[in-house]
Image (spheres, grey):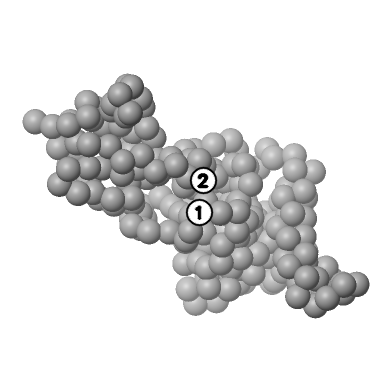
Amino acid sequence: MHPIERLLPSLHVGERVSVRAVEHGSPTDVIGFVTALTGDTLSIVDRRGVVHTLAWDAVSAGKRVPVSRGRDPLRTPPALLTQLVAAALGGEASETDAADGPGSAGPHRAAPVGPVWVARIVDVLAGRPAPETVAPWGERASFGGVRARVEGEWVVALGCTPGEPGWLGPVVDACWWATRANARSVCLVVEDPSDAAAEALAGAGFARLG
């Protein structure tokens, strides 16, 4: 029996795996998300965005692995979150300035920053099937009205509307995208101070900071 055949049910595109294989003549361990399966090869994208296409007969061991758990986001230094949120907002401001012309302040510079809500990505994605594809690799991506920026172990999401129908879907999509780049925690910038929004966020597993 081939090592990958021991993965039951059958392996699917989008799942996270760890395999031991020979690549370019050298033994190596590859951890990442499956991007393609053919009769002859297995393709995996690692956390750096490098795609490894491995021949099945070069794979000697393999197993599914969960999304990385990471540190407790509630223990994150406030200064770090402030920096990450500022970078997410600042990038949007820079893009707006470029579009509006020299000297423009741009609407995003005056955008209010509400409380932030944090969670481990592994908890947000628990029990959810992995998508076969995600947004293109990069620092930023948009998911409906949610704009996300990934840096290190964090993804910051702007434009969340907790409590509205389907509000969590774009956040989940952003998490699947960011975890492929090794993000392990998610920070939502929420401008709605209502109790209904707070209840929706807490119900989805997020905790408020600030």
Residue 78 in view of the camera: no
Secondary element at image label 1 = loop
* Residue, far left: 1
Q: Say whether residue 57 is visible.
A: yes
Q: Residue at x 23, y 49 (%)?
A: 37
* Outermost residue to the top: 27
Q: For the point 35% across and 25% down, which residue is it?
A: 28
User: Is 122 in front, or is 195?
Assistant: 122
Identify the residue at image location x=22%, y=36%.
55
Residue at the disc numbered 2:
181
Q: Give the residue type at disc 1.
A: Trp
Q: Name the residue under label 1.
A: 137
Amino acid type of the residue tagged 2 in the rendering: Ala
Q: Do the residues labelled 1 and 2 touch (CB within 8 Å)?
A: yes
Q: Position of residue 61 (x, y in %)?
A: 24, 27
Q: How crowded is mark 1: few (under 14 residues within 10 Å), some or many (20 or more)?
A: few
Q: Which of 177 and 52 is in front in this view?
A: 52
